[in-house]
Amino acid sequence: MAALPLKRGWRYANGMISVVIPTLNAEARLGECLASLVPAAVLGIIREVIVVDGGSSDRSPQIAEAAGARILTSDPGRGRQLAVGAKAARSDWMLFLHADTVVEPSWIDETDNFLKDDQRFGVFTLRFDSAQMKAKLVAAGAMVRTRLFSMPYGDQALLISRSLYDAVGGYGPQGLFEDVDIIERLVRHKGPKALHVFKTCVVTSAEKYEQNGYARQVIDNLWRLVRYKTGMSPALLEREYSS
């Protein structure tokens, strides 16, 4: 894959967005994720891509380095890694993106006006890289949850200003439900109307669902969320999830 041309373009001279991507043995999809950012990098909308690696034993760091990303390291755990990347980010806006997720090109035009209001935060429409009807139904369910309950997950990406991110204290150190945690604090701080849902899709991997079965994975996710909401330790849930 060609290196990301992370120069400032003529249209956005200040490079408005820092992209933060946590990795842990993510080589299977990381190249596609980084390649999807190239059009925005060419225009200068993206100032930098920061990959925070949690100790990969595969080629994730090498892939990120070859693509022109800035490489940082952290203890494993998505919340911890995202917090490290956010602290190092140098732009007024940050896009937090999973390493197995690809952003569709239309996000560039759709976010243009959005970037003028630093008191809103945005997530994208979820789609899986599978043509199965089960995948479409799970994605549709995620969007219902997002719109009705203001509860998107991290695989929908998060576009947020530095000022708003700092105002709510940023990502916590937890390795699971770090996405739910920060969104809850953002909604409490600004209200549900501050959450904007972009029409542009982010396409994420369906591998976990296809390995475990769609119904089982949905039930497992819901059961973990219920226990998290009723006070179970995120650290305990993380150990269970990783086992």
Image (cartoon, rainbow, N blue to C red):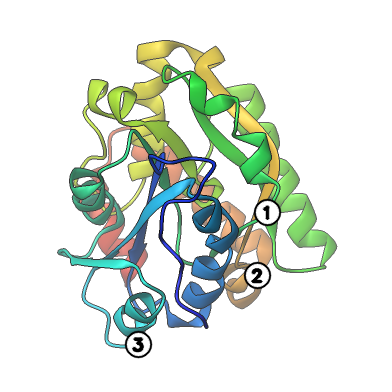
Location of mark 2 (residue)? 213
Residue at (30, 56) in percent of width and height: 78
Residue flagged by tag 1: what amino acid is it?
Answer: Pro
Residue 100 in view in this figure: no
Q: Which mark is residue 105?
A: 1
**Front one among 76 and 218:** 76
Residue 127 in view in this figure: yes
Q: Position of residue 14 (x, y in %)?
A: 38, 39
* Local SS, label 1: loop
Label located before the other in sequence (1 or 3): 3
Residue flagged by tag 3: what amino acid is it?
Answer: Arg
Q: Dividing the image into 4 quarters, which one contains the C terminus?
A: bottom left
Q: Position of residue 57 (x, y in %)?
A: 27, 87
Location of mark 3 (residue)? 59
* Local SS, label 3: loop
Residue flagged by tag 2: what amino acid is it?
Answer: Gly
